[in-house]
Image (cartoon, rainbow, N blue to C red):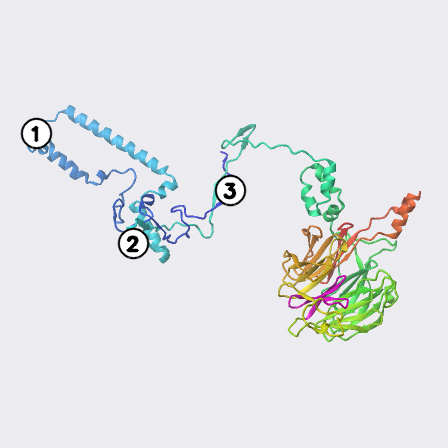
Amino acid sequence: MANYFETGRLRFKTVCDECGYKHREGTTCGVFVPADFLGGRYDEPDTPREGYMSDDDDDGAGAPGKNPDDDEDPELKEKDETEGGLGNMFGASLAAPKTALEEAKKAAAAAKKAAEEKALGIEREKQAAMESELEKLHRRMTAKEKKALRKKRAALGRQAEKLNTPKFVKRIGYVRCNCILGVPNDEPKEWVAVPEIRYVGEIEVRAEFRRETLYKKAMEPSETVLALAMRFLDARSLGRASMVNTSWRAMCEAQPHYFDLKHMEPFANFEAHDGKVESVLVYRDRIYTAGTKMVRVWGKAMDFNAKQVYEEETGMETYNLLHTPIRDTALIPMVCKANQSLYSAASNGAVREWVLAHNIKNIKFSGAMWEHSGWINDICCSAPTPGTCSMHGVVNHVCLLYTASDDRCIYVWDAVSRKRMGKIQPPNKTCGTMRKMALSERHLFVGSSNGIIYVYPFEKTCERPDRHECSLETGPKRFCLQTQLRHGDKAITSLLVGGKNHAMLKLFSGSMDGTIAIFQLYSEGYDFECVGVFDQHKAAITSIRQSWSHLYTSSDDGDIRIWCLTTYAIQRTLHCGSRVKDIFIDEAHEDEEVTQASQDVTMGGSLEDVDKEPPCGFLYAGLTNGYVQKWRIGQWM
């Protein structure tokens, strides 16, 4: 037979089913309750009180369906009836003659009484069997139940002993609750059956009557309304909106940023070094990886017909080692590019410059900047000049380099002559070491090992109200410490100044505790307040990068998280399988050949020249297991 109540739900027990109070199973409740609380069952006294039984009652006392007169000896009862009779009742010994008819009537009455008592006993047994668990718990206990309870208390030990009721509590009509049923500690769950509709053939069987819920049909919005709504939704919100109806799904699929997020997938995964990859750089479709005291250059694998080779099983791109142009005696934690040159930082305090040639075989050493006495933690380049720079007379030129080291110093270098132009030191000896740097249009931000971010201006301006070196007659000096920002107590592991469309409106700070703080930057003043904190990462932040519309953060937990720079909501999480040391964003750039070919088609040219893939951006990640991963991020991510 089908069970129409086989489905149900779990209900968690929070209070005892017997007394209604919260206490653990096998432990005395000990709560004071009224003396008449549910018939006095919870007190369970050792001594009899008015209206209650004692523990010394017989086993049959209080049992349902049993007559108290049945406890008398039947032989004595029969003897009293035969010896006494009517004469004994009225004070005289009268002999009552008995006839066969009277004996038959008496036997019939006795048989009828026995049948009635038997039927009554069966009925009481049925009622006792049908007694619910709740009614059984809330009636007075029998002697057998009390005896079993005493054995259970003795087995449980001291925690289940009955507690006495103080006299002052008894005077006000309260007694101690000695219930030990309680709530199970390991499995406090109860399965409750939930009726639902079942079908037998074509007949609908309902377990109970339920009113049908009538839903109104939602009106599908017009295309104009949808087009306006999609402009204010990020890619993750579009994914939720696509499940509303078919019209929304079609409009969401047509959005380019939703398409890029949905089809973000790994394009390559190859082993670059025996140890961990410290830094990743992409230049002219070639991947530069730093690790194990060397820098290697990787390129796409091509066959004899100059066609790209893909892996047979996964279909990913394959990369071959083209050259190892840089080797050092110390570990190379970072590489960066500026002015057609590659700069490598070493753990022995040296910064070396290498000239980048079109042929990677011709990459040569140009010079070194070796004045630091500790580990180089970060290299930062100044922004390219929009026109001709005043220092060197070069158009679109990077003039200065900044290096931060464990020797608690920041050096400013001339990018052409490689001479030191300045030196920045922390305000006192209790400050931490200089870890990471970031540049805005006005300031240099330096993150230290104690969670403090120092703010230095580029120009010779000072807005500090206190007396310091800038208060002398010589006037303000460059790189005067203006203010300090606090981001926790642990080391700053990454800094980035950016925003939507690369506007320098926010300062993103990554910490060793796995959080990312966002500070609002202003064009005037130094009231940089923290406007948000990301705490989704579970380990230390290793790198923060951005595209024109999204923020990318990597961590030692092996994940790369993508955030929208408009809503600051997480869009997607990429699982790399190992700790991520560094990430690099190669944004989509419009190809000049494709642009020129499209213009020729407009003027009546051929379509064959335009048959190329649209520009696409990629994300590169260097892992601690020596692998480099390449992810497609599309044109709009």
Above or below, 442 against 88 in this view is below
- Report the Cα–Cα distance between label 2 and label 1: 64 Å
| Type of amino acid at the residue the image marks with label 3 | Arg
The stretch in magenta equals 433-462
Location of residue 158 by image quarter: bottom left
Check residue 168 in the rendering and tell me which mark sits there, or answer none.
2
Residue receiving disc 1: 95
**Closer to us: 486 or 622:** 486
Total number of numbered labels? 3
Q: Which residue does the image show at 7% across and 30% down from the upper left? A: 94
Nearer the observer: mark 2 or 1; the answer is 2
- Residue at the far right: name it: 604
| Type of amino acid at the residue the image marks with label 1 | Ala
Residue receiving disc 3: 9
Q: Secondary structure at mark 1?
A: loop
The first of marks 3 and 1 along the sequence is: 3
| Type of amino acid at the residue the image marks with label 2 | Phe
- Residue at the far top: name it: 101
Nearer the observer: mark 2 or 3; the answer is 2
Check residue 427 in the rendering and tell me which mark sits there, or answer none.
none
Dot 2 alpha-carbon crowd within 10 angstroms: few under 14, some 14 to 19, many 20 or more: few
435 within the magenta span = yes
Q: Work out whether residue 580 can be spotted.
A: no
Dot 3 alpha-carbon crowd within 10 angstroms: few under 14, some 14 to 19, many 20 or more: few
Q: Is 58 displayed left or right of 498 in the figure?
A: left
Expressed as whole percent of the image width and height from the top left, the position of residue 404 reads 73, 70
494 within the magenta span = no
Q: Which residue does the image show at 78% across and 50% down from the upper left? A: 635
- Report the Cα–Cα distance between label 3 and label 1: 75 Å
